Amino acid sequence: MPKTAGSRRIGDAAAELGVATHVLRHWEDVGVLVPPRAPGGQRIYDGELIVRGRLIQLLQRSGLSLAEMKDLFATRSHTRRVALFADKQAELRARVDDLTRTIDFLAHVLRCTHPIVDECPDCVEFSQASQR
């Protein structure tokens, strides 16, 4: 595939996505972002692959693994996609809940007057609640 006006080589694509070139090579090895090659063997990234790269980054921030993304990109099943995203949403909500409890605990510790944290009944309550 000859280089066209809208195409980029790996270094330019990596810079545009804000990642190192080895990240794009890894995504290619995993099979989530596979660019065509120019006759000389260089990877050529077009605008569509850059969009997919941004989607990969968003999905990573959402907690999806590259293996899950590969499956997601390969599936045509709406039901499977919905189930995957519902599971990830539940995981994220649980993480947010955990972080909220942690923030509440830290806020309490900042105003706690007990000299030792484990002497404070509220701190003990936070630690017991975190085990549930």
Image: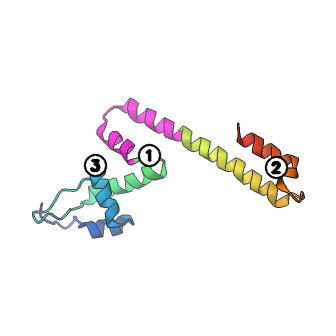
Mark 3 and mark 1: Cα distance apart in space: 15 Å
Position of the N terminus by quadrant: bottom left
Q: Magenta stretch containing residue 81, yes or no? A: yes
The residue tagged 3 is: 31
Q: Position of residue 25 (x, y in %)?
A: 29, 59
- Residue 90 visible in rendering: yes
Image spot of residue 4 (x, y percent): 16, 65
Residue 33 makes an appearance in the image = no
Name the residue beneath numbered marker 1. 64
Q: CA distance from mark 1 to mark 2?
A: 34 Å
Of all residues shown, which one is farthest toward the top? 79
From the viewer's perspective, is 90 left or right of 4? Answer: right
Circle 2 residue: 123
N-terminal-most mark, 1 or 2: 1
Amino acid type shown at disc 2? Cys
Image quadrant in which you'd find residue 131? top right
Mark pair 2, 3: CA separation: 47 Å
Tag nearer the camera, 2 or 3: 2
Looking at numbered disc 3 in the image, what kind of residue is underneath it? Answer: Gly
Check whether the beta carbons of the residues at disc 3 and disc 1 lie within 8 A of each other.
no
Q: Residue at x 56, y 44 (%)?
A: 92
